[in-house]
């Protein structure tokens, strides 16, 4: 398929505007909307091969990037600390880069460096963060020097490490491959860029974004970086979206707007910052610890493959390489010549509040500063209210004034009732499906979410409108007046929402501003020319006037559901996902179709339409209760796996006398979605042996369990623990040596030296009445500490890469005067994440082999936990 062009979109619009106002024409207009959105969202450019390079010099060649990625993916998972990540991947990248350097144009000066970094910092999450410590993490760094040894650089970053079972095709291998091809293209050009371009292939992102911290805080080239381009993935393939830009630098969008295939929404930035998405990116490190500005890109399509064994080489469309490569090459090239970068030191103190930005069907980007946004939003709000007033003035000439106001108020309440009833019924359906154990039927078949929740929203909205029109409408005014008034009031409600958003600084209100503007213009034409008084073809004008915002919102709705439906597979068990997806789908349906709903009053077969919608809803509900609605699938053609991370764990607990009071082992995992572990109980016989951890969670520091990240703490009490035989460990167990000394009568210092595997955690929880003061691992002790039995706990995550390294640190505590008792509980955990060297016991293998094909075991590792009271 050829990529969607401006001419094709214009042809669609022209065809729509030429249609008549009859029913078939209206249905065709709706089809145009759906088909147009489909082509815009799925079309990709033609991928170039080596044969195309002769006729396309200085152009991104997909075949080269594919070859680069194939070499990375063939290594399998590349976990920090593994041979594949620390030796094979580094060697492979250096080989390709050295070949590029060898074949470069003599005018290009390219420098290559291999960085080994260590450090520590605090990374805050909601509700709890962690102190991250690391040692011997590797970064492969390439610097393409600019003209006359420029002291400014553009940084482009991607990571080559992966999660434990994932080959990392999209996350983040494809972006490493794209960077290599861009480096090759730029190295062949006859003249260097104005500014330096630094390519950072970072080797530790999945370990809590640590390697980027090592680069930006320690590398000699870090201080010269002016702008960063971060390339990430929370899905597998598709179009890369620009979801963060800045902060506070609107000029960045001037250069992004020049890319050939833009896809950007500032709404994505606000969704990401809300912490509803359980992911993070290196961009946060560059921004928070390096003070950098720049761009954050990510693939969001097909999130089912993300962080699983299915994120491989074969599932990425060739057009994905070409699209991303063309875009990033264009952006890097224009930024490397940017005047703003040269003047950045002079303009750093100037006020720039950032920008609102979004693309229009991938054709072009609209962006404007926050000051313009404020003026635009306030102007639209005022005009919207004045337009309603114009409508009321016109209508009151046909009715008594008081009667007009009463009718308007009742219509306003009617719309609110439509929406509130829709939300109430959706919540009811979600609760029913949750109670009977049939949640997430749309996980594998997303269209079921439309059948359930979009249909229900339309049924209720149309029914309320038809009922009130039949039984409450007593006057003889034309029905088209009611339709138009309903449209005015719907816009007014959204206008009030915009006003609230403006007060709270929400930039995503542009999603409402666009349909408000088009609705106003359309109704101005209808009112101004009195079209609704002359003939029925005003309906065509009304529909045509709303086609653009409808297509625009359809496209955004498509991406929102494509993002969040797969994410529900890793949301945990706290919230019924039916409520989230149901309300999301309802809001998107109302947003897209709210201006069309009142047209049902003009339709002769309105009851039949409602009945058809009801049949669709009933059919969808029945399907949700049948095997069709089973959420999961391991079939590559309709992949929707259920995720599991399982640790074969040994626990050793010491009391205050250093005596072992508990020593056991078990299979441990935290349910990752709402249906876990019920769906696998009939497959895995050991699930009958689950033991409650309620008492352990009260007695032992964080239930006596290793956790993956600090976000797991809230779910620990829901952990699955199945007693079993102890594991066999491939290397030394974690060991802790500590010393204690009093700095004065009220301050005691504990010094620790900890050794063990390349991924370890440390929990520190002082007794009640004792406070954390400081640690050399961070400038401050965070206030947002997880609580255990009402006691604050410090969580330290430690990783080392190429070579083993000891974790050495101290923590000071404020104690009551002349305190002579034990001060704190401390636990050390070890995680053995490398599948190829983990000697899984026979009973662990048998346990894992029982899992059905729809289960994706992201982590099948060994764990170790030991605690003391010191």
Image: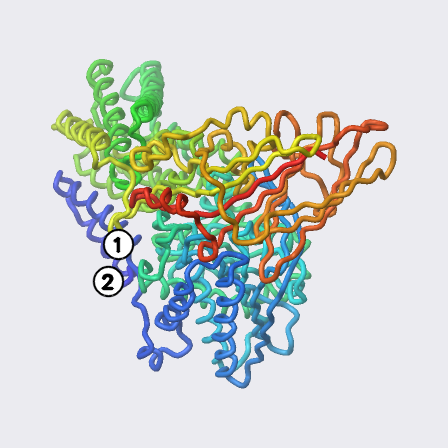
Q: Is residue 696 left or right of residue 234?
A: right
**Residue that label 2 marks:** 1
Residue 863 visible in the snapshot: yes
Q: Is residue 298 above or below residue 455?
A: below
* Residue 675 point in image, percent of width and height: 35, 33
**87 shown above or below 104:** above
> Does residue 346 appear left or right of residue 371 in this picture?
right
Judge by depth and name the residue closer to the eye, 649 or 136: 649
Q: Are marks 2 and 1 in contact (CB under 8 Å)?
A: yes
Q: Earlier in the sequence, mark 2 or mark 1?
A: 2
Residue 425 or residue 361, whichever sits in front: 425
| Residue at 15% in and 26% down | 611
Residue at the far bottom: name it. 106
Q: Residue at x 51, y 39 (%)?
A: 275
Residue 718 is left or right of residue 822, and the answer is left
Residue 553 visible, this orientation: no
Counting from the top left corner in percent of width and height, residue 1 is at 24, 62
Cα–Cα gap, marks 2 and 1: 9 Å
Residue placed under numbered mark 1 in the picture: 39
Using a 10 Å C-alpha cutoff, classify the residue at mark 2 as few (fewer than 14 neighbours), some (14 to 19) or many (20 or more). Answer: few
What SS does tag 2 mark? loop
Label 1 element class: helix
Please tell me whether residue 540 is drawn above or below residue 93 in the rendered image.
above
Residue 821 appears at what percent x and percent y? 78, 28
Foreground pick, 645 / 583: 645
């Amino acid at each position: 398929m050829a990529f969607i062009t401006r001419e094709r979109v214009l042809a669609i619009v022209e065809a729509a505007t030429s249609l008549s106002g009859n029913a078939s024409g209206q249905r065709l207009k709706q089809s145009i909307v759906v088909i147009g959105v489909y082509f815009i969202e799925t079309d990709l450019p033609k991928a170039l091969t080596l044969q195309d390079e002769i006729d396309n010099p200085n152009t991104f060649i997909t075949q080269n990037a594919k070859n680069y990625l194939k070499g990375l993916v063939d290594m399998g998972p590349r976990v920090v600390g593994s041979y594949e990540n620390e030796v094979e991947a580094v060697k492979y990248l250096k080989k390709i880069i050295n070949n590029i350097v060898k074949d470069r144009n003599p005018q290009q000066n390219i420098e290559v460096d291999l960085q080994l970094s260590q450090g520590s910092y605090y990374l805050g999450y909601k509700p709890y963060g962690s102190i991250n410590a690391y040692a011997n993490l590797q970064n492969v760094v390439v610097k393409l020097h600019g003209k006359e040894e420029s002291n400014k650089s553009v940084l482009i970053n991607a990571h080559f490490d992966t999660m434990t079972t994932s080959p990392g095709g999209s996350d983040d291998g494809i972006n490493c491959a794209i960077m290599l091809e861009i480096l090759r293209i730029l190295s062949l050009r006859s003249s260097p860029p104005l500014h330096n371009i630094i390519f950072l292939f970072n080797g530790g992102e999945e370990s809590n974004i640590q390697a980027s911290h090592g680069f930006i805080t320690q590398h000699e080239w870090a201080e010269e970086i002016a702008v960063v381009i971060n390339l990430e993935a929370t899905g597998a393939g598709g179009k890369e979206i620009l979801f963060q830009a800045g902060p506070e630098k609107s000029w960045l969008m001037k250069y992004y707007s020049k890319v050939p295939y833009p896809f950007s929404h500032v709404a994505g930035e606000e969704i990401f910052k809300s912490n509803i998405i359980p992911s993070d990116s290196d961009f946060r490190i560059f921004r928070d610890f390096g003070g950098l500005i720049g761009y954050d890109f990510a693939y969001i399509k097909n999130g089912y493959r993300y962080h699983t064994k299915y994120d491989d080489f074969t599932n990425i469309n060739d057009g994905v390489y070409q699209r991303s490569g063309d875009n990033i090459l264009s952006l890097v090239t224009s930024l490397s010549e940017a005047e703003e970068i040269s003047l950045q030191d002079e303009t750093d103190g100037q006020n720039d509040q950032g920008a609102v930005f979004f693309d229009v069907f991938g054709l072009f980007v609209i962006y404007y500063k926050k000051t313009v946004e404020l003026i635009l939003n306030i102007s639209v709000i005022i005009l919207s209210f004045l337009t309603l007033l114009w409508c009321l003035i016109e209508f009151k000439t046909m009715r008594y004034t008081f009667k007009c106001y009463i009718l308007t108020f009742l219509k306003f309440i009617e719309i609110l009732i439509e929406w509130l009833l829709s939300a109430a019924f959706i919540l009811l359906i979600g609760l029913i499906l949750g109670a009977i154990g049939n949640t997430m039927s749309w996980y594998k078949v997303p269209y079921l979410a439309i059948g359930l929740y979009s249909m229900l929203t339309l049924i209720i909205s149309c029914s309320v409108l038809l009922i009130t029109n039949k039984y409450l409408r007593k006057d003889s005014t034309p029905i088209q007046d009611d339709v138009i008034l309903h449209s005015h009031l719907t816009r007014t409600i959204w206008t009030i929402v915009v006003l609230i958003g403006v007060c709270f600084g929400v930039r995503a209100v542009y999603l409402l501003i666009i349909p408000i503007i088009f609705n106003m213009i359309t109704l101005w034409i209808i009112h101004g020319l009195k079209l609704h008084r002359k003939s029925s073809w005003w309906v065509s004008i009304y529909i045509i006037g709303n086609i653009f915002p409808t297509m625009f919102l359809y496209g955004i709705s498509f991406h929102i559901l494509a993002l969040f439906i797969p994410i529900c597979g890793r949301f945990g068990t706290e919230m019924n996902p039916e409520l989230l997806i149901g309300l999301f789908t309802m809001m998107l349906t109302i947003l897209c179709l709210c201006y069309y709903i009142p047209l049902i009053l003009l339709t002769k077969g309105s009851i039949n339409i409602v009945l058809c919608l009801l049949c669709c809803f009933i059919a969808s509900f029945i399907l949700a209760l049948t095997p069709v609605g089973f959420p999961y699938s391991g079939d590559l053609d309709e992949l929707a796996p259920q995720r599991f991370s399982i640790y074969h764990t040994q626990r050793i607990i010491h009391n205050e006398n250093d005596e072992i009071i508990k020593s056991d082992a078990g299979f441990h995992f935290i349910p990752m979605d709402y249906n876990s572990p019920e769906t696998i109980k009939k497959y895995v016989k050991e699930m009958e042996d689950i033991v409650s951890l309620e008492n352990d969670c009260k007695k032992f520091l964080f239930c006596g369990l290793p956790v993956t990240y600090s976000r797991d703490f809230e779910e620990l009490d829901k952990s699955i623990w199945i007693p079993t035989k102890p594991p066999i460990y491939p290397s030394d167990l974690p060991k802790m040596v500590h010393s204690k000394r009093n700095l004065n009568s009220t301050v005691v210092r504990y010094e620790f030296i900890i050794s063990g595997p390349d991924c370890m955690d440390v929990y520190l929880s002082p007794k009640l009445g004792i406070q954390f003061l400081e640690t050399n691992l961070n400038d401050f002790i965070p206030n947002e500490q997880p609580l255990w039995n009402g006691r604050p706990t410090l969580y330290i995550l430690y990783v080392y890469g190429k070579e083993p390294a000891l974790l050495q640190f101290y923590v000071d505590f404020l104690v009551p005067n002349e305190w002579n008792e034990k001060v704190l509980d401390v636990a050390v955990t070890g995680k053995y994440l490398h599948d190829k060297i983990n000697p899984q016991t026979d009973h662990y293998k048998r346990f894992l082999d029982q899992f059905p094909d729809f289960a994706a075991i992201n982590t099948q590792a060994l764990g170790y936990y030991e605690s003391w009271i010191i």
